[in-house]
Amino acid sequence: MKFALEQLESISLNSSRPVIISDADEVILHFSDMLSEYLLTQGMYVNFISYALEGNIKYTDTDKAVDSGLFREILDDYFENYVEKQPLVKDVAEHLENLSALCDIVILTNIPHNFASRRRKQLSDSGLNYPMISSSGPKGPVMKVIRDMTPEKLIFIDDISHHHKSVAKAVPDALRIQYIANDHLNSIEEKSKYCHHRCRDWFHIEQVIREYLQMDEG
């Protein structure tokens, strides 16, 4: 949280524009497919039968589940080797550019801070020149700080239900959109009871946001 707050201090928001706060992994960037590719090089594989890493990452030779105590090391090595390799989700750049005419955009990503600058450069090189905040843990506290920075509408986009729960508690007036880019993960994960909308693609996300912003105009 400390590092996230330091990064927020460098961001200037337009007090008269709504703010979209979007996750990166599995929302803007493909994650699970690249993680699967990486694990195969390490003698492991992932079989997502639930929306979690624990119990789903296994050793190739024994089918034994990898101890969750190793996940930090695994993810650090994954990001070390793959942070620049994660491709953009289909049409995300186009739709964020469209929405940037209406809203400020902030990317809030839970990534180890030592990889933040590399991810920030990757996003910028891909045409997504929006402020990025690296964080960890539930996203509600960071959203609360952003709420204190602006009186305008906040729109939160994330794939993970517990982040929606955290934001619902910290900033209940934020519009919460759940989106999971990976087709398989999208099929096995139920809609979060803490989000307002579950979207199927970025075209749908843009449509939902435009309708939300037009509500007061009508």
Image (cartoon, grey):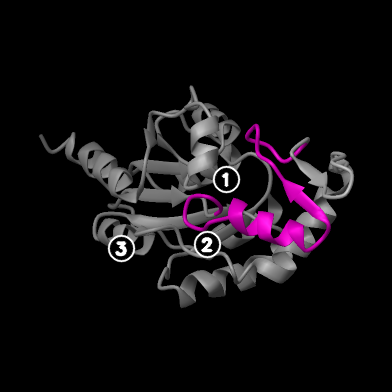
Q: Secondary structure at mark 1?
A: helix
**What is the three-letter code of the residue carrying label 3?**
Glu
- N-term-proximal mark, 2 vs 3: 3
- Looking at the rendered image, the disc whose residue lies closer to the viewer, 2 or 3, is 3
Q: Which x, y percent locates residue 32?
A: 61, 51
Q: Where is the C terminus found, in terms of image quarters? A: top left
**What is the three-letter code of the residue carrying label 2?**
Met
- Local packing at callout 2 (Cα closer than 10 Å; few below 14, some 14-19, many 20+) is many
Q: Which x, y percent locates residue 77?
A: 79, 63
Q: Which residues are magenta?
A: 25-54
- Looking at the rendered image, the disc whose residue lies closer to the viewer, 1 or 3, is 3
Q: In the picture, residue 174 is in which quadrant?
A: top left
- N-term-proximal mark, 1 vs 3: 3
Q: Residue furthest left?
A: 218
Q: Residue at x 82, y 50 (%)?
A: 60
Do residues under tags 1 and 3 come within 8 Å of each other at their CB atoms?
no
Report which residue position mark 1 lands on: 142
Report which residue position mark 2 lands on: 132
Q: In the picture, residue 58 is in which quadrant?
A: top right
Q: Which x, y percent locates residue 168?
A: 50, 29
Q: Which is the main secondary structure of the residues drawn in magenta? A: loop
Q: Residue at x 65, y 32 (%)?
A: 50
Q: Secondary structure at mark 2?
A: strand
Q: Nearer the viewer, residue 49 or 179?
A: 49
- Local packing at callout 3 (Cα closer than 10 Å; few below 14, some 14-19, many 20+) is some
> Could one spot residue 38 in this view of the protein?
yes
- The Cα atoms of the two marked residues, 1 and 3, are separated by 26 Å
Q: Is residue 55 a member of the stretch shown in magenta?
A: no
Q: Secondary structure at mark 3?
A: helix
Q: Label for residue 94?
A: 3
Query: Up-down: is 95 above or below 175?
Result: below
